[in-house]
Image (cartoon, rainbow, N blue to C red):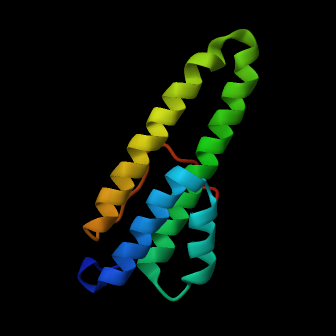
């Protein structure tokens, strides 16, 4: 875990960009920052978390699509979208303060 006293404003901004970008563009911003910012532990950590969250959301949407054939998925689509919005906002607020954010039930595929 990165030391909160050592998190620079640039690192906070990049992590914030990762979370905001995740809401609008899915896994792409998290993946780009994860690959490019290898020298910054805080950005690496938060881009990895946003990437894991976006992968979790894609899996949830795929499951909801399959379940939509029996009408349950139709209810799940707005719930997944709302959860995605809430957790991306929480991640953005947390990283703008320089705190580490973890989504409680994200699948941790990238460690």
Q: Position of residue 26 (x, y in %)?
A: 60, 53
The quarter holding residue 42 reads bottom left
Note whether 77 is above or below 90 in the view shown.
above
Tell which of 2 and 59 is nearer to you: 59
Q: Position of residue 29 (x, y in %)?
A: 58, 65
How many numbered discs sit on the rendered protein? Answer: 0
- 45, above or below 87, in the image: below
Instruction: In the displayed orientation, state which residue is furthest to the top.
Output: 70
Residue 1 visible in image? no
Taking 86 as reference, is 50 above or below it?
below
Tell me the residue at 30%/58% (across/down).
93
Q: Residue at x 62, y 57 (%)?
A: 27
Vertical comparison of 31 with 76: above or below? below
Q: Is residue 63 left or right of residue 15?
A: right
User: From the image, which quarter does the C terminus lie in?
Assistant: bottom right
Horizontal relation, residue 87 to residue 9: left or right? right
Q: Residue furthest bottom?
A: 39
Image-based side of 5 in relation to 62, left or right: left
Is residue 57 visible in this depiction of the protein?
yes
Quarter of the image for residue 85 reads top left
Depth check, front residue: 84 or 25? 25
Q: Position of residue 22 (x, y in %)?
A: 53, 56
Residue 86 picture location, percent across and down: 39, 42
Of all residues, the one furthest to the front in this rendering is 24
Q: Residue at x 57, y 23 (%)?
A: 76
């Amino acid at each position: 875990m990165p030391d909160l006293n050592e998190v620079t404003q640039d690192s906070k901004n990049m992590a914030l960009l990762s979370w905001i970008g995740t809401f609008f563009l899915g896994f792409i911003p998290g993946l780009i920052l994860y690959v490019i910012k290898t020298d910054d532990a805080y950005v690496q950590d938060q881009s990895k978390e946003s990437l894991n969250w976006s992968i979790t959301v894609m899996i949830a949407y795929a499951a909801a699509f399959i379940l939509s054939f029996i009408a349950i998925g139709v209810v799940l689509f707005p719930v997944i979208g709302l959860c995605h919005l809430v957790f991306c906002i929480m991640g953005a607020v947390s990283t703008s303060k320089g705190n580490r954010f973890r989504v409680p039930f994200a699948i941790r595929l990238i460690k």
